[in-house]
Image: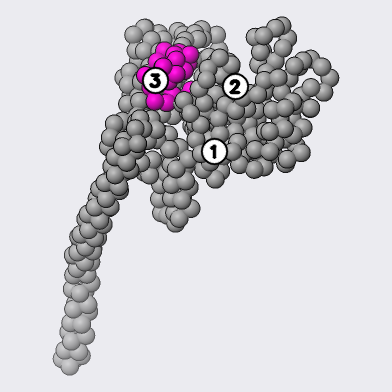
Amino acid sequence: MARSSKRSKAAIKPAKARRSVVAATPGMAAVTASADIENMRTRIDSIDERIHELLNERARCAQQVGASKTAQGLSTAEFYRPEREAQVLRQAIARNQGPLSNEEIARLFREIMSACLAQEEPLKIAFLGPEGTFSQQAVLKHFGHSVRALPLPAIGEVFEEVQAGHADFGIVPIENSTEGTVNNTLDMFLTTPLKICGEVELRIHQHLMGRMHGLENIARICSHQQSLAQCRQWLDEHLPGIERVQVSSNAEAARRARDEDGTAAIAGQVAAEVYGLNVIVPDIEDRADNTTRFLVIGRKLFAASGKDKTTLLLSAGDTQSSGTLHRLLEPLARNNISMTRIESRPSRRRKWDYVFFIDVEGHADEAPLKHALDDLKKQSSLFKVLGSYPWAVL
């Protein structure tokens, strides 16, 4: 019996030893994990240092380019090259292997280019204001945060400020994927010499906001007519009978919601932050893919980027005649040019006479589009290249 007891005690000892090893394992794992984290942090610090060195090296190169352009007598606006920026963004996306998304890579490189370009003097960008509009978001998406944004109360004033040279470029809305064309912008091109230098596509999230926290205290809803239209079905279902007030901009709607009892607004997240409003219901737009396209307007045309779009303003002598549009567009079909968009607007020359705004693939200075435009010009009573510019990058 004694020998059996001794064996039992002897058998117990290894088990205790095993338990003490197991008990010690979590602590040892924690120490190991902590050491791994510290090693990774050290590695990240080293990577950050290299990134910082490369950013400053890039900025110095940009300064040298700027000095060279200044010596040539070029203005700040002429430092900006949309075709070059589009090429840089496309290259960044092409070599991206993750884990950062293409959208994040594009955003980071836009900000790098924006900061480097601002080494001399920030670009002045006019937009449909006030602060907090989707147009302002389009400015920041396309030009980055290192610009001087100039809010203006009307689309016409954006054109005027750019034409007068008080702003280097402007951003204006041209169409929404849900509600269609912004006619005011189209009509401005009938009388202005300005050119289209780029485009921006902005995913639009419409939020219901106000000082209140629920729907029951809403007496009226203010917003731009486009935003009200983009949320029509949601408003009909959830707030039927509530007054809808059209205002000049979503930011103006947010200002009224801040200052007026019972007023709610439809606007973007930035407007809620700027005017201190509660987002009562987010994302009330009727379509999940709701997107607005903006145009960048400037005073000159730019070179090809490799993937471009051209916007034309055309008309024939008599737009009421049979087959007029077919004859006008025939050179495009003959040269295998794809047309991506067409809109008609009153010409303002005489009653029931129209002009056509047409977007086509390609750059006006490159074949085969150049050949098609040479033929098209001969058949048009009005022919104007409004711009050849890079396709929107994300």
> Viewer-nearest of labels 2 and 1?
1
Residue contact at pointers 3 and 2, CB within 8 angstroms:
no
Residue beneath disc 3: 165
Few, some or many C-alpha atoms within 10 Å of disc 1 (few <14, some 14-19, many ≥20)?
many
> Which label sits on residue 181?
2
Type of amino acid under label 3: Gly
Relative horizontal placement of residue 180, taking residue 205 as reference (left or right): right
Mark 3 surroundings: few (<14), some (14-19) or many (≥20) residues within 10 A: few
Q: Is residue 163 above or below residue 350?
A: below
For label 1, the residue is: 391
Q: Earlier in the sequence, mark 2 or mark 1?
A: 2
In this picture, residue 114 sits left or right of residue 31 = right
Seen in the picture, residue 239 relative to 86 is either above or below; the reply is: above
Cα distance in 3D space between marks 3 and 1: 25 Å
**Badge nearest the viewer, 3 or 1:** 3
Q: Looking at the image, which is closer to me, 369 or 199?
A: 369
Gap between marks 2 and 1 measured at Cα: 18 Å
Amino acid of disc 1: Trp
- The quarter of the picture where the N terminus appears is bottom left
Q: Residue at x 23, y 72 (%)?
A: 22
Residue 40 in the image, given as x and y percentages of width and height: 24, 60
Q: Residue at x 53, y 41 (%)?
A: 304
Q: How is the image coloured?
A: one colour
Tell me the element at label 2. strand
Give percent across and percent down for residue 286: 56, 26
Residue bounds of the magenta highlight: 152-173
Q: Which image quadrant for residue 124?
A: top left
Q: Which mark is residue 326?
A: none
Question: Can residue 115 be spotted in the picture?
Answer: no
